[in-house]
Every structure is written in structure tokens, then in C-alpha cells.
Amino acid sequence: MSIHEGHRQRLKGRFRKEGLDNFDELYVLELLLFYCVPRRDTNPLAHTLLEKFGSLTGVLNASREELEKVDGINANISTFLSLIMQVGRYYQVKQNEPGKILRTIEQCGNYLVPYFVGREVETVFLLCLDAKCKVICCKKVGEGSVNSANIPVRRIVEMALAVNATTVILAHNHPSGLAIPSADDIQTTHRVAKALEAVEMILADHIVVCKDDYVSLVQSQLYKPQDCCSI
């Protein structure tokens, strides 16, 4: 058994015994690299990645294109590392199965945040509720800002009508920056609300997400919806 192989076995054994709680992020990254870098010392590569992206979170948030600019990172490694964050998002989203009751803005915000984990581009989602504030679905409207031409208000209305929603919550993320609604966000909120009102649906809120934080336009007093559920 080589020195490198012995290190791999010791690190894997420690994880099986202790879990990750007491691991330094260097060792967490090494452990991940074991499964896509066979028969090679992963310590130097882990150091290089952490120096390049600043932290384990930075590495896992990096795009495949950014990762592959690092010497020693091939398509197989970049695909594996980018998969980690997306699997985490998939897991969290799948816990939010349809049928859940969302009666407060806080419940809606917490429900929506996982949909944006690891997303590097601005993405818009539509959360659709029935008359009892039960989740019907949460669908991706598209990528780009909420006021961009490729995400028309008409499409949002059509998606809500297709599932016979009573109330909807619009949500999008700010991948770089703060969860602070822009002037365009506010203007689009009112345009969407007016269009939904014409088909007897209510836009209960517009939530802006940044990482694990979010801002509600209703709570910020930037938008006031019609009365609906208990939101």
C-alpha cells in the first residue's frame, strides 16, 4: 500500500467513525477528490482549489468552466465537484413536496430558498398555492432577471392558470450581491400582480433570495397584495 493509499484509507475511516463535523475543509475537499481522482495525491490539488476560490463553498459554487481553468482539473473532476452542490439542492427541494401548507411569509421564504442553492445565474420561480394555501407546485419560469424579455408576464399568468392556482408567490435570486429588491423588481411585481388580478389570481408576494437570505417585498412595504390566506 502506498503512502497516498494509506492516507486515503485513514481519512475515509475517520469520516466513517466521526462524520464531517470536526473536519478541516481541506480534508473535506480531499475526501471528495478521492472519488474522482484515482491513485494520486489529492492534497496539492485541494490546496490549489482552496487558494483559487477562497473556501470549500467557493469551490463547490464555482462553474465547471472556472474549475477547469485550474491546472489538474479535467472534465471528470469539474463535473463531480459541480454535482455536489446540485445534489444538495435537489435533496432540499425534494423535501418540499407538494401539499405543504404555507400560511406565512416566513414559511414561503424558507420553502423557496433551497430552490436557489448553487445557482450562479439569476433564476425565476413561481410558487403556486390553492385556496387553502397548500402548495400545488413550484416551477422554474426561466433564467434572467424578472423584467427581462425572455420571462414575459404572460408566461407567469399561463403557468398559474395551468395548475388552477389561487395565489402565487414570485421569487428570484441575486447570485452576486444582496437580497435587496431593485427598482425593476418592484416595477415588475406590480405588473405581474395586475396581470394576475385580471384572471382573478393573487400575487401574495415577491421574494428576492441571495444565498441563504431573502427579502420579502411585502415585509419591506414595497408591495401590498390583496388579502389572501394568512400570508
Image (tube, grey):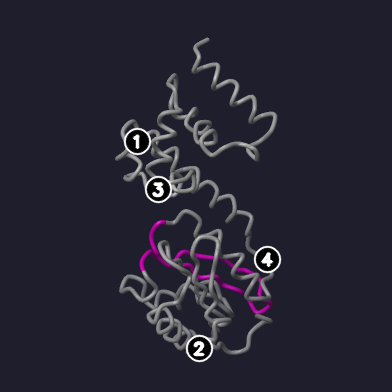
Position of 73 with respect to 20 (left or right) is: left
| Label 4 to label 1: alpha-carbon separation | 39 Å
- As helix, strand or loop, the secondary structure at mark 2 comes to helix
Secondary structure of the residue carrying numbered label 4: loop
Q: Nearer the viewer, mark 1 or mark 2?
A: 1
Determine whether 176 is above or below 91 in the image. below
- Label at residue 197: 2
**Upstream in sequence: badge 1 or badge 3:** 3
Whichever of callouts 4 and 2 sits on the residue coming sooner in the sequence is: 4
Q: Which residues are magenta?
A: 120-144
Residue on which disc 4 sits:
100
**What amino acid type is highlighted by mark number 4?**
Lys
| Residue at x 29%, y 40% (from the top left corner) | 69
Q: Nearer the viewer, residue 70 or 83?
A: 70
Q: Earlier in the sequence, mark 3 or mark 4?
A: 3
Residue 52 position, x and y percent, is 37, 42
For badge 1, the amino acid type reads: Ala
Mark number displayed over residue 62? 3
Q: Earlier in the sequence, mark 4 or mark 1?
A: 1
Q: Are marks 4 and 2 in contact (CB under 8 Å)?
A: no
At mark 3, the secondary structure is: loop
Q: Name the residue carrying label 1.
A: 75
